Amino acid sequence: MDNPWSDFLQNILIPFGGLTAEDVMISLPLWKSRTIAKGDFYNKQNIVCQDLGIVVRGIFRIYYYDPATDEEKNLFFFSENQFIVSFRSFLAQYPCVYYIEALEDAEVLFISYQELQLLYQKHKSWERFGRMLAEYFFHSSQARAEELLFFSHEKRYQDLLNQHPNIIQRVASFHIASYLGIKNQSLSRIKKRIQDNIQSKNP
């Protein structure tokens, strides 16, 4: 009997990691499906992240809770067909400093740290995948740091829309404002400026 996730995994893993269909087939028994209700967590602060996931449906935020200020600061969003993990915690098997929360009812396909390590040990192609995964998350974290340091709020907002085109319809404005490091009122002004620019170019 065919595995129902075979096509989904091939469509994600082959372009990303240079794996073959045979490589993906080897891993099929190791992947499991998990549904996560809106408001529940993929992983929590102070808990070791044990699984590498791929979002099948839904959208998540990764955020840091600061007990000193009682504030939540959004750092990343994950949506369909993207890897979902607290990578530093996963890689080092060290307690995570973030929460990963579902903002919609969601489904994730995941593989455990231990089983992924076995794939790395037994198959060179999967070992290469692991290196590319590390490079991907290093690039993502570096790009996020540079974005916060060097880019305007408007540029950050436009980049977010490129990464998650329908996020405005799916995520509350205050979550997006937190991700951009601004207040809701500033986000409203950015939206208005962009809309005004669009209208001026298309009278």
Image (cartoon, helix red, strand yellow):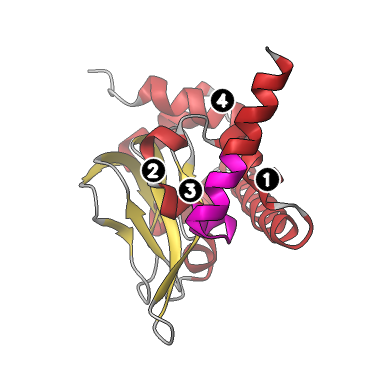
Answer with left or right where residue 11 lies relative to residue 110.
right
In the picture, the disc for residue 20 is: 4
Quarter of the rendering occupied by the C terminus: top right
Q: Point out the frontmost of discs 3 and 1.
A: 1
Q: Secondary structure at mark 2?
A: loop
Q: What is the three-letter code of the residue carrying label 3? A: Phe
Please state the extent of the stretch shown in magenta in the rendering. Answer: 177-191
Q: What is the three-letter code of the residue carrying label 2? A: Val
Q: Which residue is mark 2?
A: 171
Q: Is residue 184 magenta?
A: yes
* Residue ID at (55%, 49%): 187
Q: Earlier in the sequence, mark 2 or mark 4?
A: 4
Q: Secondary structure at mark 3?
A: strand
Q: Position of residue 62 (x, y in %)?
A: 44, 58
Mark 4 → mark 3, Cα distance in angstroms: 28 Å
Answer with left or right where residue 89 lies relative to residue 199.
left
39 shown above or below 129: below
Q: Which residue is mark 1?
A: 154
Q: Secondary structure at mark 4?
A: loop
In the picture, the disc for residue 77 is: 3
